[in-house]
């Protein structure tokens, strides 16, 4: 029987609760009962790949192969909607406020973290924004760390290959400068150029880990439209981590629909859902 012909029964509440517990423990994503249908449809795809018909059997499979399968389980559930230059006001702020400040101060290196980078559009947009700003200037030593919990989207991101519809909103001149248009078998695809890729390091990282393997502080942290999937406790914990890893004069970018009100007093508002770091015993 082919994968598409495998009949899988309905997901019962008891099984849903068990999967919810694993997903929450491993990713911090707190799934409400309203997400049951979504979880069922996502799990069905993975179960068909494995030839498993029963949710209880798949749960046992997760336990028996936990080191790898809990990653596949989280991959199934995570939502990875993103675009190039999404929430473009942030990149306007970067070009008009942040980078001119760095240039005038003679900053020789810039460290940036794209936390929850999904399929790579955000870190590539950040890299392109910096290359555009410094196009007629000396480019500082730029390093962009791009992390996600989902290994599949990281593979897509590292490949840097995108369909034409994905890049349609990018300015044509910018597109030509930083992407190669596919021909022949690659018609309809665009590949990120190597001078953009070399600025970025893709790594798997769980934002709910107690500590991160990061030594040096970041000048800029992007974490946009990620924490909306976390509960309050997990959000508080994460922003404490960001505060620790952000330079004293750094910038934190969160999603336009997100806020730190009632979540963290460790940052102060700078406009356009951009925040600065409140230093210890110092008020903005």
Image (cartoon, rainbow, N blue to C red):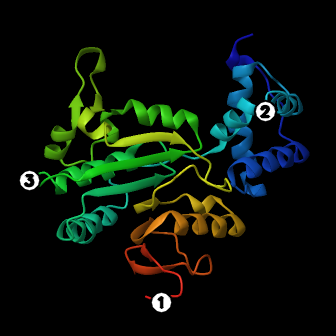
Looking at the picture, does residue 136 appear above or below residue 70? below
Q: Position of residue 270 (x, y in %)?
A: 38, 79
Q: Which residue is mark 3?
A: 136
Looking at the picture, does residue 253 appear above or below residue 226? below
Q: Which residue is mark 2?
A: 66
Q: Position of residue 2 (x, y in %)?
A: 70, 12
Work out how far the residue at label 1 is from the one at label 3, CA to CA, in angstroms. 37 Å
Looking at the picture, does residue 77 appear above or below residue 264? above
- Classify mark 1: residues with Cα within 10 Å, few (<14), some (14-19) or many (20+): few
Who is closer to the viewer here, 210 or 238? 210
Cβ atoms under marks 1 and 2 closer than 8 Å: no
Quarter of the image for the C terminus: give it: bottom left
Q: Judge from the rendering whether residue 218 lies leftward or rightward of residue 238; answer left or right.
A: left
Q: Position of residue 1 (x, y in %)?
A: 75, 10
* Residue 273 location, quadrant: bottom left
Q: Residue at x 53, y 82 (%)?
A: 280
Work out how far the residue at label 2 is from the one at label 3, CA to CA, in angstroms. 51 Å
Q: Secondary structure at mark 2?
A: helix
Q: Residue at x 24, y 47 (%)?
A: 170
Residue projecting furthest to the top? 1
Q: Which residue is mark 1?
A: 283
Which label was assigned to residue 27?
none
């Amino acid at each position: 029987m082919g994968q598409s012909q495998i009949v899988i029964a309905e997901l019962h509440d008891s099984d849903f609760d068990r999967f919810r517990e694993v997903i929450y423990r491993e990713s911090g994503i707190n799934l409400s009962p309203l997400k049951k249908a979504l979880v069922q449809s996502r799990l069905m795809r993975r179960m068909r790949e494995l030839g498993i018909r029963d949710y209880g059997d798949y749960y046992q499979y997760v336990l028996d192969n936990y080191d790898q399968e809990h990653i596949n389980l989280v991959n199934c559930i995570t939502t990875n909607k993103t675009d190039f230059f999404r929430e473009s006001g942030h990149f306007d702020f970067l070009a008009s406020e942040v980078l001119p400040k760095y240039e005038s101060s003679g900053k020789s290196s810039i460290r940036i973290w794209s936390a929850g980078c999904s399929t790579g559009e955000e870190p590539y947009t950040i890299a392109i924004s910096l290359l555009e700003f410094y196009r007629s200037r000396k480019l500082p030593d730029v390093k962009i760390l791009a992390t996600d919990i989902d290994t599949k989207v990281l593979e897509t991101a590292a490949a840097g290959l995108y369909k034409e519809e994905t890049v349609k909103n990018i300015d044509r001149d910018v597109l030509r400068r930083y992407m190669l248009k596919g021909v022949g078998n690659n018609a309809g695809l665009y590949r990120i150029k190597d001078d953009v890729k070399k600025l970025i390091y893709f790594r798997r990282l769980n934002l709910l880990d107690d500590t991160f393997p990061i030594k040096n502080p970041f000048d800029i942290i992007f974490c946009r439209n990620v924490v909306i999937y976390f509960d309050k406790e997990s959000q508080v914990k994460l922003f404490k981590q960001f505060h620790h890893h952000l330079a004293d004069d750094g910038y934190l970018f969160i999603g336009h629909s997100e806020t730190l009100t009632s979540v963290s007093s460790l940052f102060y508002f700078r406009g356009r859902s951009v925040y600065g770091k409140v230093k210890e015993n110092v008020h903005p």
